[in-house]
Image (cartoon, rainbow, N blue to C red):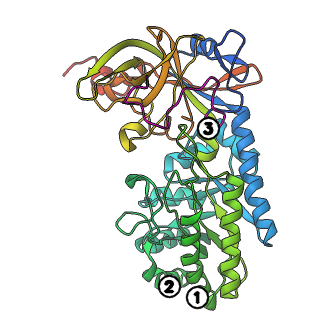
Amino acid sequence: MKNPLQPDWLVAQKDLDAKIWSKTARRNKAGALEVGSVPVAELVRKFGSPLYVVDEEDFGLRLTAVKKAFAEAASKHGTQVKLYYASKALLTTEVIRWVIDAGYAVDVSTGGELAVTLAAGATGEQIGLHGNNKSLVEIGRAVSADVSTIVIDSEIEIERIASVAGAQDKVQPVRLRVNTGVHAHTHEYLATASEDQKFGVPIIEVESLVAKIREHNHLKFLGLHAHIGSQIFSPDGFVESANRLLELHARLLSDGDVPELNLGGGFGIAYTQADKPLAIKEMAERIVSAVAAKCQALQIAIPKLAFEPGRVIAGPAGMTVYTVGTTKQVKLEEAGANRLYVSVDGGMSDNARPALYEAEYSVALASRNSDKSQQLVRIVGKHCESGDIVVRHGLLPQDVGVNDLLAVPATGAYCFSLSSNYNFVPRPAMVAVKSGEARLLVRAETEQDLLARDTGYESGGER
């Protein structure tokens, strides 16, 4: 009998769902989960638990597939495309090397992200700088590094960037971020192009602000930019945003070149059985075709297009492995049903998305196989918060218990990036796995690492 607390979309599956798990994730002959031909239990023994695991082969295949999808779509309509990997999704020096080796540029939004990207060996031409509150120091570092573009987010940044570029006797290419008013169908906190939010300038101000940009000899205007949200499954929002931007683009052409149009990122992925994102190939074709049709209607040339994929590359390539600590049956009288709470050794410190956005994830028993029937579970963390939920709705065998390993797929994006030390919990290690080999990307923090920043500890507690 189905548990009345179980959502309709959640059904038992014999095998791993290929749309959710990374390409090399599979169960071996013993029934244990492995990635890149390495059992996750072996990874935990070597690197600890919790553990971020990146399927390097999967990451590379997604880099190739996304690039091919947009390049082919652009080529059909006689234009080109430039892809910026959204580094906020997942950022390490090694990840950046994978990205630039695949022919991508890198989108950064802070001085820290810029520093990591440069440390990885990226050139300025391979970097674009975003951000709604870029400091003079950050702008100065970006101009000094000869970044390919800086996105202007407010009027005050025009003078700020121009003055820094002038001081270095350089001409800095810039874009202007526009709040198009298009609100993608997504969680409220993920929407970044509705009228009442911090990013971009209103459409009605664009032409006057572009005129100000063009007045500066040390600025070169490349074009407009918009980002309509995140975890988007349909091209409709991109198409509407592009239509509005292209009408502006056409008017701006009367006073000078506008060589590019950046439509941002936000392409969604499947976290659960309920998620059905459009394939990236079809997404690219429909967006670029709509741009071409609008340009034809406006009787203008199709500009070079730019996009900023992040989650769609990094998300499915990652998983997080946890160890079960306790289990607890909770009887819910009103529902007339039980839910098994399974507590693991991580939580909202390594994956804040369920707490921030009520994000849903999937889960599987990783260390062994089981022929027991499945039951409804909620995977929770070890933090002192009732909202510390890792997987809100999951199915695990009836015999799940202490010391079992659990794997949560699709955690490659915005989990490591949003991680914290809440409750003074050290952050996990991150490993890349490929062809039977595992290597450390980021070592696990220790309590000693956290204490090292405490000046009271450094002074021996003396006052």
Magenta residues span: 1-20
Q: Earlier in the sequence, mark 3 or mark 1?
A: 1
Q: CA distance from mark 3 to mark 1?
A: 40 Å
- In the image, what residue occupies the spot 64% across and 35% down? 317
Question: Label 2 is placed on what type of residue?
Answer: Glu
Would you say residue 19 sits in the magenta stretch? Answer: yes
Image quarter for residue 147? bottom right
In the structure shown, which secondary structural element does the residue marked by tag 1 occupy? helix
Q: Give the residue pinned by disc 2.
A: 207
Q: Position of residue 33 (x, y in %)?
A: 64, 18
- In the image, what residue occupies the spot 54% across and 56% down? 141
Q: Is residue 388 above or below residue 148?
A: above
- In the image, what residue occupies the spot 73% across and 59% down? 70
CB contact under 8 Å: marks 2 and 1: yes
Q: Which mark is residue 251?
A: 1
CB contact under 8 Å: marks 3 and 2: no
Question: Label 3 is placed on what type of residue?
Answer: Pro
Q: Earlier in the sequence, mark 3 or mark 2?
A: 2
Nearest the viewer among 132 and 183 is 183
In the structure shown, which secondary structural element does the residue marked by tag 3 occupy? loop
Nearest the viewer among 285 and 312 is 285
Q: Position of residue 132 (x, y in %)?
A: 43, 61
CB contact under 8 Å: marks 3 and 1: no
